[in-house]
Amino acid sequence: MKQVEDSEILALFAVERTRNEAFNLLLKKYQQKIYWHIRRLVLNHDDCDDLLQEVFVKVWKNLDKFRSDSQLYTWIYRIATNESITFLNKQKQRNNTPLDEVSSELADNLVSSSYFNGDKLELKLQKAILTLPEKQRIIFNMKYFDDMKYEEISEVLGTSVGALKASFHIAAKKIEAFITNDQIDY
């Protein structure tokens, strides 16, 4: 099946009678990518589903205001990233816990999740990622898992390419140290 271009989706969305068709094409094209982006940030399947729905409601409400000065998917990623960060911050405030404890709770939820089917190394990688500061974790996920270019990540996060490269490098070194540390056995 041929992948629909963003320009086609936007053109269809601009016409009232084809708006639903356009949105369905957009969902088909981006829903899975956005799901996994959010899931790697919040880790919990149910929370991810809720956030995914909120993200696409925002996309629906604001797509007619999209200015095409960035790519459509980086715009959607920005919305998804912001929604995920807001969710994690609310979770931290609701529980009145520091972010490192929230990360620990997320790791515990990952271990007990029936939706996680990775092996020990995958679990260790996910736990290593959770030890990163929030921004490094987001950058690492976008580069490593989503295979985004630094320029695209820069558009999403509003950070310079140089700063992103440095953050990714530092994050990769921290993850490598975590995984190779023999004293930590998960």
Image (tube, helix red, strand yellow):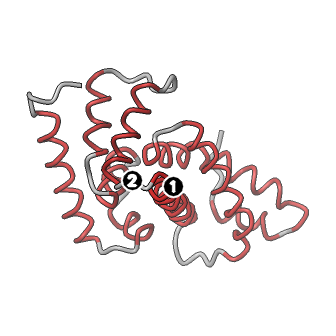
Distance, label 2 to label 1, CA atoms, is 8 Å
Q: Is residue 155 left or right of residue 33?
A: left
**Up-down relation of residue 101 to residue 108 (above or below):** below
Q: Is residue 131 left or right of residue 55?
A: left
Q: Which residue is mark 2?
A: 97
Q: Nearer the viewer, residue 50 or 5?
A: 50
The residue located at (29%, 44%) in the rendering is 129
Q: Residues within 10 Å of mark 2 (few under 14, many from 20)?
A: few
Q: Is residue 161 left or right of residue 94?
A: left
The residue located at (30%, 75%) in the rendering is 160
In the picture, the quarter occupied by the N terminus is top right
Task: Specify the farthest residue to the front.
Answer: 96
At which x and y percent is residue 137?
32, 53
**Up-down relation of residue 95 to residue 17 (above or below):** above
At which x and y percent is residue 116?
45, 26
The residue located at (53%, 67%) in the rendering is 71
At which x and y percent is residue 117?
43, 22
Callout 1, which amino acid? Arg
At which x and y percent is residue 62?
70, 70
Callout 2, which amino acid? Thr
Task: Specify the farthest residue to the left.
Answer: 182
Q: Secondary structure at mark 1?
A: helix
Q: Is residue 107 left or right of residue 38?
A: left
In the picture, the quarter occupied by the C terminus is top left
Q: Which residue is mark 1?
A: 94
Q: Residues within 10 Å of mark 1 (few under 14, many from 20)?
A: few
Q: Secondary structure at mark 2?
A: loop
Task: Specify the farthest residue to the right.
Answer: 17
Residue 85: mark: none
**Up-down relation of residue 172 to residue 78 (above or below):** above
The residue located at (32%, 29%) in the rendering is 123
Q: Nearer the viewer, residue 148 or 46?
A: 46
